[in-house]
Structures are given as C-alpha cells and as structure tokens.
Image: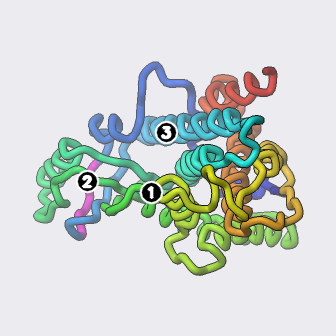
Amino acid sequence: MKHIELLRPILLQGLLNTEIPVETTDFKKWVSSGNYIVRDIPSNKVIEIEVNNEYAFNHMVAFDSCRMASASFETMESIHSISSLPKSFAWIAIKSYYAAFFSAHSIMRCFGNICSQLERSHVTQLNSYGLTVGLKNSIRSDAGFFAGKYDPLTRLLVLEKMSNTHEDTWRAFKKCLQIISNKVLTVSGLTVHKQQVSATVDDIIFRLTDRGRLSKGNYLSQYRNAVNYRQEHDAWHPYGKNSIKSEKIIGILSGWRQEDSISPAVWKESKDSYSFFLTCRDVVSLNHQIINLVISNSENAANMYRRWPGKLLSLATAA
C-alpha cells in the first residue's frame, strides 16, 4: 500500500514505546492482573473498563499483536507447493487463511481493538470488580469470546461478548478497517494520497464481504470451511476443472512483503479462489507494512515489534 505512513497518527501510540516483556503479558493475564476499574455493565453482554495503567495495557496489546504477527509471517514463509502434486492447494489455502486470520488479529490491536477468549474465572473477576464499585448488573459468568475497542482519550475499553470466534473476528476486523478508511481521510496529508489509502482499505473490505454479499466480512472463513470441511473448490484429489496449479497461487502469495500492491492477471480458473488468495495476501501484507510503520517510528531500540516480528522477518530474509 502506498502512503502507509498516513496511518501513523491513528495507531495506538503507546505501542511505539513498548519493550520485550520479561514474561507473558497476554489479554487473559492482563485481566487477571486487575490493572483497571470496571466502570459500567450496561447489559449482560457488555462491560466498560477504565485502564488505570496505560503502560501495562499497551504492553499487553503489543504482546498479543506481535505474537499474532509472528505466527502470520511464519505461516506465510512455510507455504510451498508439492512438485509431485502440482494441483494440490488445499493446505496452501488453509495455511493462507490462518496467516490472514492471525494478521487480522495483529492489525486490530495496532488500532486499539481487542478480540480474545476469556475463561469463566476471568468473567467472574470482572463481575466481582463491578460489585466492588457498586454496580448492580453483571455480564454472563461463563467463558466466551469478547471483542472490544479502546479509546485512549477516555481510557475506556468497551468489551462485548460475542458468539463465534472466527465469524466475529472477521466482523470486528471489517469494522476496524472501516474506521481506518474513514479516519485516514482526516489526518494531515495530501488529499489524493489519503484517498488512495482509503480506497485500498475499502477494496480489502469489498473482497472480505465477497463484493458486498456477506455483511459480516467472513468470506475467507467461508472459503476455508468449504475447503477444509467439505473438500470443495477442487482443492483435493481428484482435481477438477477449477483446480489451480499451486505455483500460480504461490506467485500471488509471494508478494506479501512488497510495499506496492500487485495485481496479477485474473486466471481462467475459479474467480472465488483468486479472490480468496489475493485477499489473504493483502491482509498479511497490510499487517507487514503496519509492523514496519511501528518499527520505523519508534526510537526505542528494544521496541517489541522490532525485537519480535521484525527480527523474525530478518531471519527469514537471511535464509
């Protein structure tokens, strides 16, 4: 994506100052740590948390973002074709999906969005903190998947209990991209450049929704399910007319590290498969560019992004 630097003002700014932690600091451990105040529970599915230690919060967000980015990049590096089975692409599709899924999680956190599973003990703790400050309502005290948005101005993290880990992740990611697309138009910069960035993000949204057909933005998940659980899209032997030579797919995926988008000619085979692999690549590519944006704008030599996914990329390049 050209002019990625325009996203700099809308990143979660505290990420620029994070360092490699001495121990795991993921979202679950952060909830257990109690570095927050439960301010409100509007319903049994929504809870509002005030962060009272921004340093610890930013480290938690960076930790989860970095581990997801590393998983995504390592997955992309492991994708390759099988010379003896030139049309075998089922596992390439499954790996591509998870690389995009991990990157979606990483990207969301870079802009202050949280998507995570919580155990019943975490939910019970949140409710007990609410009782401590005199709140009468509570959220459902069972384990579940939560999605939320952090506002640095109010220091409020609003979490909502969701129902489906993958489907709701893509719904949250689509919403995050929509906010990015709108906010980038308000930052300082040339209007034409801001419009180009917004249009590029909108194009990813367009493909995530399968050209507007899926309001939840879960096209990649639907395609992966079709390949993984129903053996569709001619991805498995015996191959059919929609089977694609894996080298063609690798040719598309290999561009994920490049700063400018690549638009290879649409192949004669399945357009659904083309859109799937192109979108997976572009989601990972966006994550890669945002990681580099954080690294280039951090003056801290020990910045978590530089020392973790950044180092992984260096190792992979050296190999």
Residue at horizontal 73 percent and vertical 48 percent from the top: 87
Would residue 260 be counted in the magenta stretch?
A: no
Residue 166, numbered circle? 1
Q: Residues within 10 Å of mark 1 (few under 14, many from 20)?
A: some
Q: Secondary structure at mark 3?
A: helix
Over which residues does the magenta segment extend? Answer: 37-42
Q: Residue furthest front?
A: 238
The answer to whether 168 is drawn above or below residue 213 in the figure is above
Q: Which residue is located at x 80 percent, y 27 percent? A: 317
Question: Label 1 is placed on what type of residue?
Answer: His
Please identify the quadrant where the N terminus is shown. bottom right
Q: Which residue does the numbered mark 3 point to in the structure image? A: 64
Disc 2 crowd rating (10 Å Cα; few below 14, some 14-19, many 20+) is many
Query: Which of these two is toward me, 207 or 135?
Result: 207
> Which image quarter: residue 207?
bottom right
x then y, percent, for residue 81: 73, 39
Q: Residue at x 60, y 34 (%)?
A: 70
Nearest to N terminus: mark 1 or mark 2: 2
User: Is residue 183 something one can see in this rendering?
Assistant: no
First in sequence, mark 3 or 1: give its number: 3
Residue 44, picture quadrant: bottom left
* Residue carrying label 2: 38
Q: Residues within 10 Å of mark 3 (few under 14, many from 20)?
A: many
